[in-house]
Image (spheres, rainbow, N blue to C red):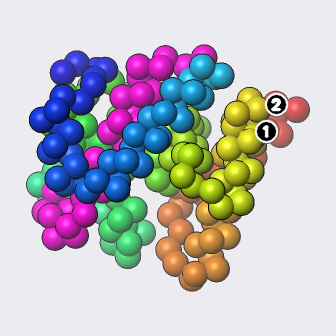
Amino acid sequence: MGDFMKFTEIDIANVKNMIGEKRYDHIERVVQTVVELSKIYEVDVERAKTAALLHDVGKIKSKELYMEYIEKYNIKLDSYELENPDLAHGKLSAKIAYFEFGIKDDLILEAIRMHTTGNAEMHLITKLVFIADYIEPKRNHESCVVARKLAFEGKLDESLLYAMNQTIKYVIDRNEILHVNTIKARNSLIISRRYSC
């Protein structure tokens, strides 16, 4: 299908069957948000849209099937993902994008792979997919409203930093596993902001 794609009706049916209607509706809202943000940040809209379309194809509703796919694509779970395998769905989505949808573009694959945890020195497309996933229109709790406002005001890094801070607080409050990549992403944003002042 090349590096940029649109889902065919068969693709949509297959994806909906694996991830469920509700998750697919979320994907469509993330795509809508990414398209709007791409205009503000002057990003290649087709690349960003493709990454958004495929960012959650690995979020398979059956936990058993999810683990079968992790094994099928020989995905090595790090210590954080072993504790919480759902953290690896970005890795799985990138593998599915590559092997089942023919996506070879490294920037698209990185955006898909890193949309859950983030990472240090994220590319602009990765940042857009990450924040679009956080602020898509049906997410209306206060932190999403604040992050959305910042993102649409042209303050992308500020929006990302705010979203990550809120996510970290949420995870800590529940005494759950926090992936080290999120810490790296947050630290990278803070350091880059200091040097850009």
Query: Which residues are drawn in magenta?
Result: 42-69
Question: Residue 72 at x, y = what percent?
Answer: 11, 54
Check the picture and name the quadrant holding the N terminus. Answer: top left
Q: 26 or 55: which is nearer to us?
A: 26
* Magenta region includes residue 67: yes
Decide: is 38 above or below 79: above
Q: 50 or 185: which is nearer to us?
A: 50
Q: 35 or 98: which is nearer to us?
A: 35
How far separated are the C-alphas under marks 2 and 1? 5 Å
Q: Could you tell whether 76 is left or right of 131 in the image?
A: left
- Report helix, strand or loop for mark 1: helix
The residue drawn where x is 12% and y is 35% is 10
Asked whether the beta carbons under mark 2 and mark 1 sit within 8 Å of each other, the answer is yes
Question: Residue 98 at x, y = what percent?
Answer: 22, 34
* Magenta region includes residue 65: yes
* Amino acid found under the numbered disc labelled 1: Arg
What residue does disc 2 label?
Answer: 196
Can residue 151 be seen here? The reply is yes
Decide: is 100 above or below 2: below
Check the picture and name the quadrant holding the C terminus. Answer: top right
Quadrant of res 61? bottom left
* Amino acid found under the numbered disc labelled 2: Ser
Question: Residue 183 at x, y = what percent?
Answer: 61, 58
Q: Could you tell whether 192 is left or right of 141 in the image?
A: right
Can residue 119 be seen here? The reply is no
What is the number of the mark on residue 144?
none
What residue does disc 1 label?
Answer: 193
